[in-house]
Image: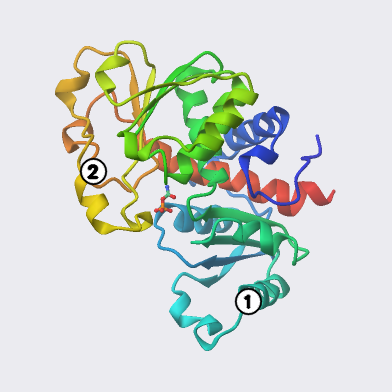
Amino acid sequence: MKFSLKDIISIKDFTIKDINYILKESEKMEPVARSQELNQDMLGKILGMMFFEPSTRTRLSFETAMKRLSGSVVGFDQPSCSSTTKGESLADTARMLASYSDTIVLRHNLEGAARYIADIVDVPVINAGDGAGQHPTQTLLDLYTMKRVFGKIKNLNVAIMGDLKYGRTVHSLSHALAMFGTNMNFVSPKELRMPPEIIHDLNQQGVVASETENIYDILDEVDIIYVTRIQKERFLDYEDYLKIKGAYILNEEMLRGKDLIVMHPLPRVDEISIDLDYTKYEQYFQQAFNGVPVRMALLEVLIKKNKL
Ligand code: CP
């Protein structure tokens, strides 16, 4: 199968076939991701990284993915060390990196930044998070995690809890889950509800997600609780953040006897108590590792297979 996308900008650009293809290819990458097999598919290829916002998992798992495939990585994670501080535009910076590399990974605070540079450069562009917009590679690894645990995505019952207004991971994820016909329950304080335009999109896809402020309303029904951090950096008024901070904290006692898993894109602040870390519920660390095989599969299809 030839993968239909040149760039990875929004999960909404994917068909179910595209997603399933990446999930299958990711599985094949597991032994290489775990350093049990050698793979030289990216020998001589270079991944270009531009991170205008902090990252641990996305940046390091992309680097790991490229290096496990024997490729190299260039770029910056401190924009203050790039010539953007001299006034160089994002467009010119992207043009430069495109001429030095085979694919660009961009994280930026502005929604739409990845789409903007994808229209300018010829190499594939991967959106590693654009403001409160989308985080499509996170969604792919989230779906991969669900599939690994449950053997399916369709017909799962998922609670998505936390900052649904600013959390880009849950924006991407809810679109993808709607494609698979997954049942969704949104749990958030009223100030941080899922944006109406996303609810509208989901309704157009034939999905009606329940909404509540109380996790106990749906705790007995769900297979997965997908927790997100309150996105402090996106609040316009810090006082508003302080009012909501710590509104939801999941702990072992709350889940005792339940048959479910807990996922989180990480980083966590205080929304998952550490007493859950060594229980059967924890999937968030495995989920973070899954970013490696999934991003390896994406690099393969974008840089190699797509060109065949
Ligand atoms: N999940 C995620 O995007 O983590 P980082 O911000 O550490 O990359």
Height in image: 163 above or below 39?
above
- Rendered residue at 65%/36% (across/down): 22
* Mark 2, other Cα within 10 Å: few <14 / some 14–19 / many ≥20: some
Mark identifier at residue 93:
1
Query: In the figure, is residue 18 to the left or right of 243?
Result: right
The percent position of residue 3, horizontal first and vertical second, equals 77, 40
Residue shown at 42%/37% (left/top)? 287
Say if residue 32 shows up in the picture. no
Nearest to the observer: residue 280 or residue 246: 246
**Helix, strand or loop for disc 1:** helix
**As rendered, which of 207 and 127 lies closer to the eye?**
207
Residue 127: quadrant of the picture = bottom right
Q: Nearer the viewer, residue 122 or 113?
A: 113
For the point 61% across and 78% down, which residue is it?
89
Q: Position of residue 96 (x, y in %)?
A: 68, 77
Give the label on residue 244, or none.
Answer: 2
Q: Please state if 165 lies on the left or on the right of 88 as rendered.
A: left
